[in-house]
Amino acid sequence: MLKRVHFRHPYLPYLLVAPQLAVTIIFFIWPAAQAFWQSMLVEDAFGLGSEFVWFENFIALLHDPQYLNSIKVTAIFTISVTALGIGSGLFLAVMADRVIRFASGYRTLLISPYAVAPAVAGVLWLFMFNPTVGILAYIMQGMGMSWNPLVNGTDAMVMVVIAAAWKQVSYNFVFFLAGLQSIPRSLIEAAAIDGAGPVKRFWTVVFPLLSPTTFFLMVINLVYAFFETFAVIHATTSGGPANATNIMVYKVYKDGFVGLDLGSSAAQSVILMLIVITLTVIQFRYVERRVEYGN
C-alpha cells in the first residue's frame, strides 16, 4: 500500500504548486526582503541618498519610549479585540443556533456587519461615542459616567476595541454557527439524559468539540488585530489622544508616510512581521496540542 502520492510525470507536482509559489514569492517574500533591506538604510526625506547602517534602526527603536509604548498599546488592543470578537461571536452563534422561527433572518442580520468597510465601521462607532452628538455617549453621561474618547486615552481605547471587534464578530459568528450545527445532536441529548444542565453541556460537550474552530479563529483574529485594524484607528483616533491608540501598524504608517523616516518605518514593519510569525508558531506548536479533533 502506497503511503505517498505518486505522479506519472515527475514535473507535474511542481506545475501544480507553481501558481501558489509565484503568489507567495511576488506578494510576500519579495516585499518582505525589500522591507528588510530598507530597514538597514537611512534615507533622507527626499529620497536622494541613503546610507547602509546595519541594525542601527532596530537598536534605535528598542530605545525609543514611543515605540515601546506602541508595543504595549498593541498588546492590550490585540488581546482585547481577539477576546471580545471571539467571545461575542460564540455567544451570538449559540443564541442563533437555538432560534427556530425567523432563524435565517437573524443570521442574515448578524452577518451583515462583515460587509461594512473597516473605516466606515470606525466612523459609525465614532459618531455613536462622540461626546457631543453620540447616542451612546449621551446615555453614559445620563448615567453619570464621564466619557470623552477625544481627550481620554482609556475611553479612546475602549471605543476602537469595540469598533474593531464589532467588524470581526460576523466572521467569527459564521464559523462558530457552522461548528455548532456540525455537532451531533445525539451527544447533547445523551448529556441531557445524564442530568447535565445547559451550562455544563456547553462546557463539557459543545465547547471541546468547537476547539478546532476556536483555534482557527484565534489565529485569524490575531492577524486581523495586528494588521487589518489600521483603517479603524485612522478613521477614529489617528493614534491619539497622546498616542493612547497608536498601535504598531499605525506607527509604521505615521513614521513612514507622514514622518518620511523610511528606514525606521521598514524596521518597524519587520519587527511587526516577526512578532506575528512568532505568535502564530507558538499557537500552532503549543495551543494546538489542546485542540480536540473529532474522528
Image (spheres, helix red, strand yellow):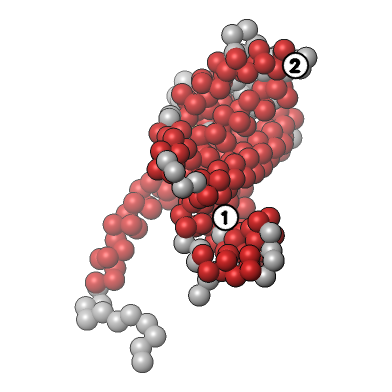
The count of marks equals: 2
Q: Which residue is located at x 53 percent, y 40 percent? A: 169
Answer with the quarter of the image where residue 1 lies: bottom left
Q: Front-most of 75 and 97?
A: 97
The quarter holding residue 108 reads top left
Pick the front one: 157 or 62: 157
State the residue position of label 1: 214
Name which residue type carries label 2.
Met
Image: 6 above or below 221: below
Residue occupying the point 48% across, 40% down: 170
Residue at horizontal 59%, vertical 8%?
Answer: 133
Task: Write down the quadrant of residue 10 in the picture.
Answer: bottom left
Residue 153 seen = yes
In the rendered image, residue 123, in percent from the top left (x then y), is placed at 51, 20
Marks 1 and 2, how far apart at CA: 36 Å
The crowding category of the residue bearing disc 1, from other C-alpha atoms within 10 Å (few below 14, some 14 to 19, many at least 20), is many
Name the amino acid type tagged 1: Thr
Q: Residue furthest right?
A: 144
x and y percent of residue 191 in the render?
63, 67
Residue 251, percent from left and from top: 59, 29
Which of 82 and 262 lies nearest the eye of the viewer?
82
Q: Which residue is at a point 40% across and 43% down the rendered structure image? A: 104
Taking 131 as reference, is 262 above or below it?
A: below
Characterize the local packing of mark 2: few (<14), some (14-19) or many (20 or more) Cα atoms within 10 angstroms: few
Position of residue 14 relative to residue 30, above or below, is: below
Name the residue that disc number 2 marks: 143
User: In the shown orientation, is residue 100 left or right of residue 137?
Assistant: left
Q: Is residue 8 left or right of residue 162?
A: left
Q: Residue furthest top?
A: 132
Mark 2 lies on a secondary structure that is loop
